[in-house]
């Protein structure tokens, strides 16, 4: 019999390539689980929100580049369009995130520009200098609590600037900050006009968010959420205020579900 050998009792033994069924299933599910981790998670936003954000991104980027070009010329404004477009996506599409708040874009752009110009002054304009500027800018943004990912691209562009931008020297701060402020003003106006609260309001001091079922359960406060976020050794684009709102909304849905189940049983 092909793929088999005769056992001592004369019965065909298992094939050479035989695997137990359970083990075979494990081998099949392992690649599937690994691939599933690479797939994007489902979004919780509606297409109307996508359209709202897309219009805001286009208008905000156009406004920022246009104002910058009026004062510093179109070449300088076009040189900054990459980071501005990335910032626009944060400010209009995920405006509730911690990386999209006003201090994040203003402080992030300021740190990236100052660090990059300092690196250029000390080491000149080269690829090595640009990479160094990105790393130092990240450290400054973390220290000043103004982490803004598009500022990393800005650090690269300031070091590897075109001739028109490079001729400004330390004056490059002016077009960068003007563009950042214009983008922020556009986000403040557009988001609030379209009924999206921006920026996020400050949290109330230590409100009780979740009340435990057991009497001995002390519940969760805003301070607990803040401490839990600090304990996690990673960058998480969420604020304690967002977590409070999410927990409160979950409590409301749980109460409605519980009441519905009670009426279903009694009916």
Image: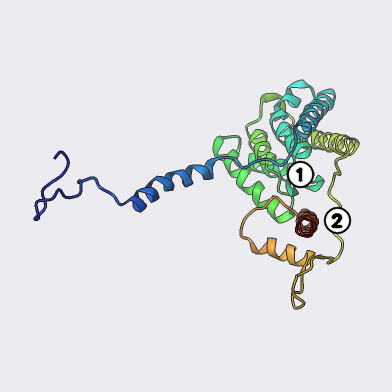
- Mark 2 closeness class: few <14, some 14–19, many ≥20 residues within 10 Å: few
Sequence-first tag of 1 and 2: 1
Q: Is residue 160 left or right of residue 15?
A: right
From this viewpoint, is residue 170 visible? Answer: no
Residue 118 location, x and y as percent? 68, 43
Find residue 225 and report its horizontal and vertical position in percent. 74, 63
Is 52 displayed left or right of 138 in the figure?
A: right
Residue at horizontal 71 percent and vertical 48 percent from the top = 147
Q: Nearer the viewer, residue 238 or 247?
A: 247
- Could you say which is closer to the camera, residue 56 or residue 254? 254
Q: Is residue 41 visible?
A: yes
**Secondary structure under badge 2?**
loop
Q: Position of residue 160 (x, y in %)?
A: 62, 32
Residue depicted at x 80% and y 33%: 179
Pointer 2: what residue?
Answer: 202
Quarter of the image where one finds residue 66? top right
Query: Where, by quadrant of the figure, is residue 127 drawn?
Result: top right
Q: Nearer the viewer, residue 36 or 146?
A: 36
Q: Secondary structure at mark 1?
A: helix
Look at the picture and state if 186 lies above or below 27: above
The residue labelled by disc 1 is 100
In the picture, measured across the screen, residue 184 lies left or right of residue 225, that is right
Nearest the eye: 174 or 226: 226
Q: Position of residue 190 (x, y in %)?
A: 87, 34
Answer yes or no: do the residues labelled 1 and 2 have beta carbons within 8 Å? no
**Residue at 86% of width from left, 52% of height from top?**
201
Q: Which mark is residue 122?
A: none
* Mark 1 → mark 2, Cα distance in angstroms: 15 Å
State the image quarter where residue 73 is shown: top right
| Quadrant for the N terminus in the image | top left
* Residue closest to the far top: 74
């Amino acid at each position: 019999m092909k793929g088999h050998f005769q056992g001592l009792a004369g019965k065909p033994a298992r094939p050479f390539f035989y695997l137990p069924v359970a083990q075979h299933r494990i081998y099949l599910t392992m690649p599937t689980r690994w691939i599933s981790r690479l797939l994007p998670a489902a979004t919780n936003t509606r297409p109307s929100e996508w359209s709202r954000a897309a219009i805001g991104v286009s208008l905000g980027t156009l406004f920022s580049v246009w104002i910058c070009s009026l004062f510093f010329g179109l070449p300088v404004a076009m040189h900054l369009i990459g980071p501005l477009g990335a910032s626009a996506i944060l400010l209009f599409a995920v405006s509730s995130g911690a990386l999209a708040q006003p201090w994040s874009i203003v402080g992030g752009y300021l740190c990236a520009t100052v660090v990059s110009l300092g690196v250029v002054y000390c080491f000149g304009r080269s690829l090595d200098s640009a990479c160094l500027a990105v790393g130092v800018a990240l450290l400054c943004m973390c220290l000043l609590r103004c982490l803004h990912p598009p500022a990393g691209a800005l650090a690269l562009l300031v070091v590897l600037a075109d001739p028109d931008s490079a001729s400004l020297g330390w004056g490059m701060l002016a077009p960068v900050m003007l563009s950042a402020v214009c983008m922020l003003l556009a986000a403040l106006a557009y988001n609030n006009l379209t009924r999206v609260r921006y920026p996020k309001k400050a949290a109330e001091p230590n409100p009780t968010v979740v009340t435990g079922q057991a009497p001995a359960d002390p519940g969760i406060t805003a301070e607990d959420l803040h401490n839990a976020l600090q304990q996690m050794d990673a960058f998480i684009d969420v604020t304690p205020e967002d977590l409070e709102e999410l927990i409160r909304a979950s409590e409301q849905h749980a109460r409605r579900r519980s009441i519905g189940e009670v009426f279903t049983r009694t009916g």
